[in-house]
Amino acid sequence: MHQLYTAVFEPGFFSSEPVRVALGVGAMVAIVSALVGVFTVIRGQSFGGHALTDVATAGGSGALLVGMSPLSGFVLGGVLGAGAMEMIGVRRARGRDLATGIVLGAATGVAALFLYLDTTSGATTGATQQILFGSIFVIDGSTVHYVEGFGSLALVLLGFIYRPLLLSSINTDIARARGISVRLVGTLYMLVLALSVGLSSLAIGTILSTALLIGPAAAALRLTKRMGWTLAVAASIGVGATWIGVLLAYDSYYWGSSGNGWPVSFFIVGLVFLAYLASGLPVVRAVTGRRMPSDLNVPVVER
Amino acid sequence: MFTGFMINAWTIATIVAVVAGVVGFFVVLRGSAFPAHAIPNGAFAGAAGANLVGLNTLLGLAVFSVLAALGIGSLGRRGRHDVVTALALVMMLALGALFLSRSTQYEPEIFSLLFGEVLGVSSTEILPVALLGLVCIGSIAALYRPLMLSSVVPEIAEAKGVRGHRMESCFLLVIALATAMTVPVVGALLIFSLMIGPPAAARSVTDRPLVAIALSVALALSTVWIAIASSYITNWPVGFFVSAFSAFCYVMGRALGALRRSRFALRTQIATVAG
């Protein structure tokens, strides 16, 4: 029993300070991302959510350039990007995808420039890798408070707009008929999305943060029928993937003789991807009693 | 600026711009901006993987972008398209990150694969890229009519026996090929802006497809040429200029399109008042 235990948890897993911080921050980030992600998937805004991460890349690398912490850059960049996309905000889905793409393209260009300047100025080595792929193991203690702050803010905002957001995500016309300002709710939601993208960028890197946003939510929507359950399942999948990912990354230091571990972001994304694939398996569907993958049943949002 | 290794850069960038202009027109027409963004990132993983095991980079690029295209095509049939695209995208990126972390040259390698290194192209790369480019343009030409039909009026295309899903898969494959050849030049993240900026601008200016394709190629060419020249002078990454000029093209295109529409509206107004 003890052998099995040490095989799963390599020595020092629980006593290591970086691991404890990683588990705490990871759980917070995973919960916020998963809950926000459910709405992102229902609203069909996966591309928008992903584009925000690229805008956050530009923000994060810019923040490094002027010597600020990347987190503030991620959040600031995300909020600005959300504003830009909301402003262009073309009504038809096809036009919206294009507008999103243009913002995304421009943002990556700026990110390329900032990262280039970061690396050549020599002040921050490893900037590209740190910003893009992140490492949950190198978060320092002071950042934890910001993560908690921004995370709680996102959750409170989400709770505040929960009902009108849900209604306007599922049926815009009914929401409008009930006197909900769809535009305002949409804008507030983009703000929440920007906050959550900023947080997950910190944990698994800007490029990969889409995984925590979309993956658990999409899997949960396939597995459950009731909104409450969907949110709970999404959050559990997110936290599960993050924690197991951290564990595997920690263990991977002991796998080869080389002594360098595998990137934690790889494990987290891989697990999220597996969870999504598993949620579509016939066996799983038989157990949960859903005949079709439910993401096909989600009412298409009027655009 | 026009000697030695710069000749290679100009040649290869010209090929890339022509292909991106043609393929990009259909990307914009079909609204496949998201897959067009996702597939190049698959190519990124391929390049990193090939680098790790010591294979030819172009081979790795081709294999992984085709895999990404097929994956998105087949998974997208059952699940929601945008969700599957997003997940395939991050999975490929994560694999790329893993491959790169296993190899020794981590930092510069990521940067050049994601953001491009047109100035470091060698003359041996030109022939394969030119061949792949020809294949892309050739397949677009061969598919032109059914592709156009299924992009603009999917229902009629279906009635005429054009299978929508098969067309989508074919088109994703063309994007994959175009991507494989372009990633080493402008990078995974920025080929995307070249594929949607100029074509979107062209489309908002004209409604005639062939004119739009020609215009989009012309815009893509000038974008790339100006970008290389600026990058040579300032020493800043070429990707930055590519995306900046692409976005500029789009904004100008939108403005011109709006102007054209308002003038048209004015003319009809005058006609009704006069008539």
Image: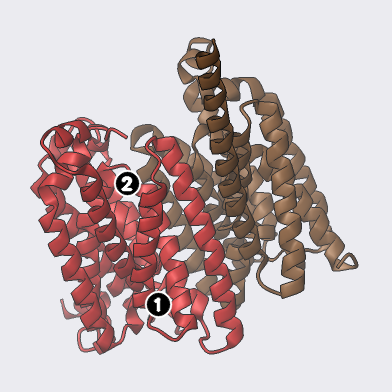
Tag 1: residue type?
Trp
Colour brown belongs to chain: B
Mark closer to the observer (1, 2):
2
Callout 1: residue from which chain? A
Can residue A157 be spotted in the picture? Answer: yes
Can residue A6 be spotted in the picture? Answer: no
Say which quadrant the C terminus of chain B sits in.
Answer: top right
The residue that mark 2 highlights is: A277
Judge the density around disc 1: few (<14), some (14-19), many (≥20) Cα neighbours within 10 Å: few
Residue at point 11%, 57% (across, down):
A159
Q: CA distance from mark 1 to mark 2?
A: 27 Å
The residue that mark 1 highlights is: A255
Residue at point 47%, 26% (across, down):
B165
* Residue that sits furthest to the right in the current view: B3
As displayed, is residue B209 above or below residue A127?
above
Tell me the quarter of the picture where residue B66 sits. top right
Tell me the quarter of the picture where residue A23 sits. bottom left
Judge the density around disc 2: few (<14), some (14-19), many (≥20) Cα neighbours within 10 Å: some
Q: Position of residue A149 (x, y in %)?
A: 19, 75
Callout 2: residue from which chain? A
Residue at point 43%, 74% (across, down):
A60
Tag 2: residue type?
Leu
* Secondary element type, mark 2: helix
Q: What is chain A's hue in the picture? A: red
Q: Position of residue A234 (x, y in %)?
A: 19, 54
